[in-house]
Amino acid sequence: MVFSVTMSDVKEDSSNSEASISNSQEDTIPVKREQKQAESDKPRCPNCGASSFSEDSAKGELYCTDCGSIIDEDRIDFSEEWRAFDAAEKDKKSRSGSSITFTKSDKGLKTKIGSSGELNNVKGSKRQQYYRMKKWDNRTSNSKERLLQRGLSEMKKLVSQLGLPESVSEEAARLLEKSREEGIVKGRNLEVLVAALTFLVARNQGTPRTLDEFAEAISTKKRKLGKTYRYAARELDIPIQPAKPEDFVPRFGEQLGFNGQEQAHAKRIIDEARGEGLLAGKSPKSVVAGVFYIVSSVENKELTQKEIAEKVGVTEVTVRKNYSDIADKLDIDMD
C-alpha cells in the first residue's frame, strides 16, 4: 500500500501544530494576565496617575504623595485616642483585656467582679447585689480551681519576698498547673511544692536563690524542700541545672557596692578558676565570696572578709579559704 502526501496535508498539519502551540500559550498567559489585572486594580490618582498614597490621620484625609491631590476625606480614625508611657499604664487603659497568663487560675479570661474596696464605691442599692454575685462566683469554682488559686497566691508572695523576676513566676505557675493535672500535688504540702517549683525555675533561668533562702521564706526545713524539688523535677521531667557562681555575681555585687566593671572582673576570675579546675566540689556562694574579696583588694574597695561573709551568707573562714586557693593558683597579687 502506498501513501501519498499532498501540500494541503502539510499545511493542515502545520496549522494544527500552530493551533496547539497557541492553545498551550493561552494556558500560560492567564498568570501574566492576572498580574496585569492586579496592577490595574490598584487605585490611582485621577490627576497624575500615581499609585502611592499617604494618610493624614489628624485630618482624616488620604492624599497622593506625588502631586498632593486629596483622594479621600472624612476617613474614620481607628487608632487609640489615648497615650501610655509605660506597660502598666497601657494595660490599665487598654480595652481589649489583659493577655493570657498562668499566674491566674483562670488564665485571666474570666470576668472579675471586683475587690471589696472597689465595691464600696458602688451605690448601696447595688452593692449587696454585687457581693451576692461575687459570693456565688466563688462557690461555683471547684476544689481544683480553689487549690490552684491558693497555690498561686503563695507563689506571688514568695516571688515578691525573694525579689524574683516575673518570668520566674509565669513559668512556675505553668508548672504548678501541670502538677495539679498530673496529680503531683495530691498528698503534698502545697506551700513546699510551690517553693520547690519556683526554686527549679529560678535556677534554670539564671536567677538562682539558695535552698536556705527558700526554706527560710516558707519556714520549713531545708531537707524537706530539697526532697520535694528533686521529686518534682523527676516527675515533671525538668532538668536540674547546676547553679553557677557567676549567676550570683550581679545580685551580691550590687549589695556590696561593686560597679559593672568590677563585677565583670569577678566573672573573669571565676572563668579562669574554672579553667584551672578550682571550682569542683565548691559551693557557688563560697566561690563568689572569695572572688569578691580578691576583687575588693585589687580594686582598693577596702571591704573586710566579715562584710563580704555577712552579705553572701557564708563564714569568714570560707571566704579566707576560697580567696587564698584561687589567688595562689592564678598567681594574683593581693598586696
Image (spheres, rainbow, N blue to C red):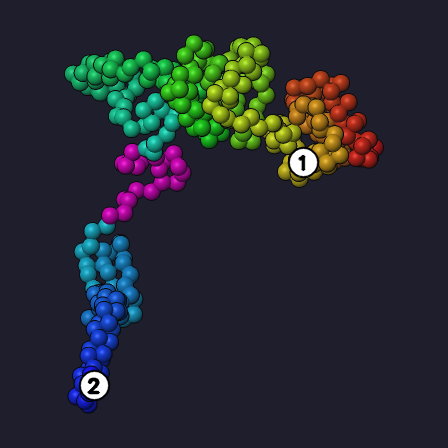
Q: Main secondary structure of the magenta part?
A: loop
Between disc 2 and disc 1, whose residue precedes?
A: 2
The segment highlighted magenta reads 78-97
Please say if 218 is above or below 156: above
Q: What amino acid is at disc 2? A: Val
Identify the image quadrant of residue 262.
top right
Q: Does 84 appear in magenta?
A: yes
Few, some or many residues within 10 Å of mark 2 (<14, 14–19, 20+)? few
Q: Disc 2 marks which residue?
A: 2
Report helix, strand or loop for mark 2: loop
Q: Is residue 1 left or right of residue 191?
A: left
State the residue in front, 213 or 66: 213
Identify the image quadrant of residue 250.
top right
Q: Position of residue 255 (x, y in %)?
A: 62, 27
Q: Position of residue 286 (x, y in %)?
A: 69, 23
Q: Does 249 appear in magenta?
A: no
Q: How many marks?
A: 2
Q: Disc 1 marks which residue?
A: 267
**Quadrant where the N terminus is found in the figure:** bottom left
CA–CA distance in space, label 2 to label 1: 99 Å
State the residue in front, 305 or 137: 137
Residue visible at 41% across and 26% down? 174
